[in-house]
Amino acid sequence: MAAKFLLPALALVGSAIAQCDGPSITITTSEDASQISSCQTYDGDVIIASEASGQISLDGVGRISGDLTCKNASQLTAISASQLTQIGGVFDLEELQILSSLQMGSLVGVNQINWIALPALQSLNFAQGVSTANTVRISNTGLTDLRGIELQLVKAMDINNNNYLRTINVNALTNVTDSLSFSANGMNLEIEFPNLENAANLTFRNVSSISMPSLSEVPGSMGFYSNQFESFAAPNLTEVGNTIAFVDSPNLSNLTFPSLTTIGGGLLLANNSELSAVAFDKVEMINGDINFYGSFDTVSFDSLTDVKGASSIYTSSTNTTICDLFESAKSNQVIKGKLTCETSSDNTAGNGSTTGSSSGSSRSSSAAVANLNYDPTAPLTGFAALVAAVLFI
Ligand SMILES: *[C@@H]1O[C@H](CO)[C@@H](O)[C@H](O)[C@H]1NC(C)=O
Ligand SMILES: *[C@@H]1O[C@H](CO)[C@@H](O)[C@H](O)[C@H]1NC(C)=O
Ligand SMILES: *[C@@H]1O[C@H](CO)[C@@H](O)[C@H](O)[C@H]1NC(C)=O
Ligand SMILES: *[C@@H]1O[C@H](CO)[C@@H](O)[C@H](O)[C@H]1NC(C)=O
Ligand SMILES: *[C@@H]1O[C@H](CO)[C@@H](O)[C@H](O)[C@H]1NC(C)=O
Ligand SMILES: *[C@@H]1O[C@H](CO)[C@@H](O)[C@H](O)[C@H]1NC(C)=O
Ligand SMILES: *[C@@H]1O[C@H](CO)[C@@H](O)[C@H](O)[C@H]1NC(C)=O
Ligand SMILES: *[C@@H]1O[C@H](CO)[C@@H](O)[C@H](O)[C@H]1NC(C)=O
Ligand SMILES: *[C@@H]1O[C@H](CO)[C@@H](O)[C@H](O)[C@H]1NC(C)=O
Ligand SMILES: *[C@@H]1O[C@H](CO)[C@@H](O)[C@H](O)[C@H]1NC(C)=O
């Protein structure tokens, strides 16, 4: 009785009859994989078992309609799939302690890349390069660069905790429709997106240089936290839909946004101890709040006409002209919300505390209006005229 059922199963393995219809196949050895090696498309999920060890070859199969998954195969060293061009689902690799080779010379399209905890994986062998993917999440790998990820469009990309990552240059990337995020990667990570034009949201943490010369539009937010760069420039950026933040960049001394006209959210600068000059000379409109904390000596907004939110300015600089300018902007109704401006300030960390005692000049906006006795119908003269001409119209 038993033999009757056993025989066909054995025959199947031996002759590698193509089993191209899913829903799934679990592969422990390359021999198991030979069952799908003649499939142009395997219609389902391919799961490499956690017991798999050494090298697994998926050579032959051209396309996997579902996921390609391998989790917790602690003895697996290599996965190859020389003809595989597309993965319709998730390319999910997790907790593969000694996986050091991913050889997929034909792979061009993946729905989602999800690679987590691949400490021995130092490079990708993707000769063609993955040019389309919806989402890419790469965390805790040994990768030193992302060569092989050659995306032109991506919905979301999150690259974090890859301690050996030194360079990222995705030359082809032009549009990001949801978010790009980099955090806690290699100490000296240099990021280049030479052709990136439109990125919905951008977040950079622990990065040492960023180049995005073509960036023209960020519909969402742009946040830079704990970076080591000395300068950041967005030469072509004209509009940001939400907030711009630069926080905790101790080496940042040169911030350049020469084309930016509109900030749909707020503008936050805090804990950038080397930033002595703040200039957003083309910015006309800020929809949210201005929050500046630091030691900057000059602030210029040559084109500003409308700040819908509040403004909080705290600088340790003794340059009282800074507050004169903001107060003038408040009294001109350029700044619609509450204004708090303090020079010679102790509250330069931007920790939300505005009640600490201040040794310097601290004036509320109402006091400032009274001080300057601004009359909008009177022609501007003297200092007020200079202020208006130089800075806030
Ligand atoms: C991974 O495998 C080890 C044993 O090999 C097991 O103890 C652990 O629970 C597994 N982890 C997951 C997430 O499956
Ligand atoms: C990244 O920056 C955060 C602060 O935002 C810091 O706590 C963390 O230690 C940094 N990580 C690395 C790897 O530099
Ligand atoms: C990419 O961004 C550019 C510049 O914002 C835009 O003109 C173009 O339509 C976008 N392309 C796609 C495919 O989203
Ligand atoms: C910057 O924008 C201008 C005008 O849209 C364009 O001609 C130029 O190629 C852009 N520069 C870069 C580096 O993309
Ligand atoms: C930006 O990110 C936020 C929050 O993660 C999300 O709600 C939004 O859709 C993203 N895109 C844009 C264009 O704001
Ligand atoms: C950043 O500044 C610190 C001192 O604040 C210095 O030790 C470090 O070398 C600087 N890093 C770079 C990349 O310039
Ligand atoms: C600041 O950066 C801009 C753009 O990269 C550059 O043109 C300018 O010379 C720099 N300024 C200083 C003082 O280094
Ligand atoms: C004081 O601030 C104003 C406005 O930013 C600037 O024009 C001026 O050069 C600053 N003075 C000094 C001494 O930094
Ligand atoms: C905020 O910063 C000020 C000045 O650095 C400090 O005196 C105060 O204790 C801080 N408050 C909090 C809640 O950390
Ligand atoms: C600036 O740094 C101080 C001290 O590390 C911290 O308390 C504060 O929250 C930081 N400010 C911002 C806006 O992150």
Image (tube, helix red, strand yellow):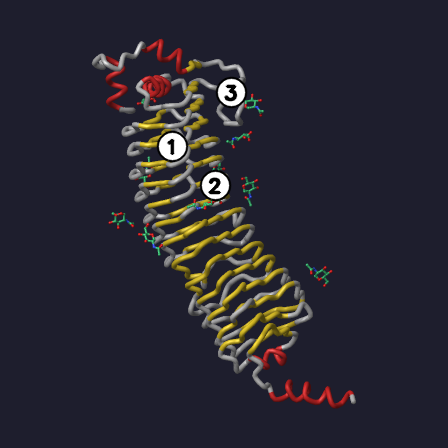
Mark 1: few/some/many CA within 10 Å (<14, 14-19, 20+) = many
Residue holding disc 3: 354
**Residue shown at 62%/81% (left/top)?**
31
* Label 3 lies in ligand 9 vicinity (Cβ under 8 Å): no
- Of the numbered discs 3 and 2, the one sitting upstream in the chain is 2
Mark 2: few/some/many CA within 10 Å (<14, 14-19, 20+) = many
For the residue labelled by badge 3, is the local secondary structure a helix, a strand or a loop?
loop
x then y, percent, for residue 179 = 45, 49
x then y, percent, for residue 242 = 41, 38
How far apart are the two marked residues, 3 and 2, measured between alpha carbons? 26 Å
Q: State which quarter of the image contains the N terminus.
A: bottom right
Count every numbered label the image shows and give the total: 3
Amino acid type, label 2 = Asn
* Label 2 lies in ligand 2 vicinity (Cβ under 8 Å): no
How far apart are the two marked residues, 3 and 1, measured between alpha carbons? 22 Å
For the residue labelled by badge 2, is the local secondary structure a helix, a strand or a loop?
loop
Query: Which disc is residue 287 wearing?
Result: 1
Amino acid type, label 3 = Thr
Amino acid type, label 1 = Asn
x then y, percent, for residue 298 = 35, 25
**Residue shown at 49%/71% (left/top)?**
104
Mark 3: few/some/many CA within 10 Å (<14, 14-19, 20+) = some
Quarter of the render that holds ligand 2: top right
Q: Give the answer, above or below, for where 83 lies relative to 116.
A: below
Residue holding disc 2: 227
- Of the numbered discs 3 and 1, the one sitting upstream in the chain is 1
For the residue labelled by badge 1, is the local secondary structure a helix, a strand or a loop?
loop
Quarter of the image holding residue 257? top left
Left or right: 382, with 333 as reference point: left
Q: State which quarter of the image contains the C terminus.
A: top left
